[in-house]
Image (cartoon, rainbow, N blue to C red):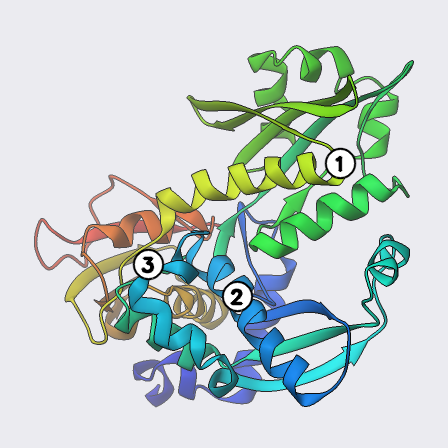
């Protein structure tokens, strides 16, 4: 069929809708994040000078989300980009200050929230030109197990917890572009996840929770108020790898944000790539289990969505196998890690019929 030889970007609208529905229905190991190029900044006025000044702060937020690195906005080779933030703005709007926290912001003189949407292509190009790394849109799901001790009470944070703490945690995750999971309230109520296990940072129960929720990573934390300050201890679990750190802050929201920042800093280091403006090389990829048009569409959409991939070309189809050429904008070895993250394709050692040479990467399309 003629459309099979085309990139997904030029596929028919009907097929695009089919792909979107399929992806949305999937339970994933990672998620494609939206809103990475949007930022929110509280302002004290709606005049032009205030807005232009706020654009720089908004762009800094976006750059941190897109690169995963809080240091990038201050790099010398980013100075021109940051100074011309208004050039990258697509649209802006004002909205009410968010709750909770609106009262505190009003006490500081803030009256509205400026919401800024930046041009994705322009921002990415500026980062590439500045040799800054990019963290793709497909990001690991982070399960947060948070044990909280406040005075004589203690609890595990869970879904449907209508608390300021849940709102703060979600805001911190959105600020860093992290897909967040919380344990279900029934799992906490029925003791499937125990406060004592999280508070004590016991590895096996924490990893069991990771498997139950299908998360790529688990952030296990404990926070408590000690002598007027909030103390925290954090552990980031990824498979057999565990990274631990501690933080403290005068405010509870501050110490929670530090935990999310620590997780985002560590996760991004594993997935960021230095992209080139063009194609860095061609990788041959064979995918098995591609037996229907819908399966082909899902495979093509996923490969095309990877930031490290500049172009996807279908070379040959035989039975339930499809051979693709991927033009990559980074080191060729990075493609395997990028493909594996999304939970759509799984690396296999099986020998398919469609092979160009021993360097061909072979994957199985997952249900």
Sort mark 1 into few (<14), some (14-19) or many (20+) by Cα contacts within 10 Å.
Answer: some
Q: Earlier in the sequence, mark 3 or mark 1?
A: 3
Disc 1 secondary structure class: loop
Image quarter hosting the N terminus? bottom left
Question: Which callout, 1 or 2, points to the residue nearer the camera?
Answer: 1
Vertical arrangement, residue 249 with respect to residue 132, above or below: above
In the visual, does 314 lie left or right of 28? left
56, above or below 149, in the image:
below
Visible residue check, residue 367: no
Judge from the rendering whether residue 28 lies leftward or rightward of residue 161; answer left or right: left
Query: Gap in Å between the C-alphas at discs 2 and 3?
Result: 13 Å
Mark 3 to mark 1: distance in Å? 32 Å
> Which mark sits nearer the N-terminus, 2 or 3?
2
- From the top left corner, tell me how far across and down residue 306 is, in percent: 38, 64
Identify which residue is drawn at 66% across, 81% down: 51
Q: For mark 1, what is the residue? A: 251
Residue 62 is tagged as 2
Q: Residue at x 52, y 66 (%)?
A: 62
Distance CA(mark 1)–CA(mark 2): 25 Å
Q: Residue at x 84, y 53 (%)?
A: 101
Residue position marked by numbered label 3 in the rendering: 133
Label 2 sits on a secondary structure element that is: helix
* Residue at 67 percent of width and 80 percent of height: 50
Badge 2: how crowded within 10 Å, few (<14), some, or many (20+)? many
Given this view, does label 3 or label 1 mark the residue nearer the observer?
Answer: 1
Q: Point out residue 56 in the picture as x, y percentages from the top left corner.
A: 53, 73
Residue sitting nearer the eye, 256 or 238 = 256
Q: Are marks 2 and 3 in contact (CB under 8 Å)?
A: no
Q: Nearer the viewer, residue 154 or 250?
A: 250
> Label 3: few (<14), some or many (≥20) within 10 Å?
many
Q: Which of the two discs, 1 and 2, labels the residue nearer the N terminus?
A: 2
């Amino acid at each position: 069929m003629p459309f099979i030889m085309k990139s997904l970007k030029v596929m028919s609208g009907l097929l695009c809708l089919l792909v979107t529905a399929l992806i949305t229905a999937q339970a994933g190991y990672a998620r494609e994040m939206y809103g990475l190029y949007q930022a929110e900044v509280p302002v004290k006025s709606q005049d032009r000078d205030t807005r232009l000044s706020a654009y720089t702060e908004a762009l800094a937020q976006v750059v941190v989300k897109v690169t995963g690195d809080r240091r990038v906005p201050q790099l010398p080779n980013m100075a021109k980009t940051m100074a011309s933030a208004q050039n990258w703005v697509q649209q802006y709007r004002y909205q009410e200050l968010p709750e909770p926290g609106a009262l505190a912001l009003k006490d500081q003189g803030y009256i509205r929230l400026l919401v800024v949407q930046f041009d994705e292509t322009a921002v990415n190009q500026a980062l590439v030109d500045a040799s800054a790394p990019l963290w793709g849109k497909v990001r690991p799901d982070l399960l947060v197990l948070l044990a909280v001790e406040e005075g004589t009470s203690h609890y595990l944070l869970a879904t449907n917890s209508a608390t300021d703490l849940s709102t703060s945690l979600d805001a911190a995750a959105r600020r860093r572009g992290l897909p967040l999971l919380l344990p279900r309230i029934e799992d906490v109520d029925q003791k499937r996840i125990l406060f004592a296990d999280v508070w004590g940072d016991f590895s096996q129960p924490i990893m069991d929770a990771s498997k139950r929720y299908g998360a790529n990573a688990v952030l296990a934390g404990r926070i408590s108020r000690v002598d007027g300050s909030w103390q925290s201890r954090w552990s980031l679990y990824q498979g057999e790898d565990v990274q631990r750190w501690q933080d403290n802050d005068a405010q509870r929201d501050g110490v929670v944000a530090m935990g999310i920042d620590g997780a985002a800093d560590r996760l991004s280091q594993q997935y960021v790539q230095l992209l080139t403006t063009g194609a860095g090389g061609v990788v041959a990829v064979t995918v098995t289990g591609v037996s229907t048009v819908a399966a082909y569409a899902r495979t093509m959409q996923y490969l095309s969505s990877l930031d490290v991939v500049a172009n996807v070309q279908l070379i040959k189809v035989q039975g339930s196998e499809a051979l693709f050429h991927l033009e990559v904008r980074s080191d060729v070895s990075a493609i395997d890690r990028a493909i594996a993250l999304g939970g759509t394709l799984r690396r296999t050692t099986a020998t398919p019929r469609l092979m160009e040479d021993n360097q061909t990467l072979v994957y199985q399309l997952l249900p």
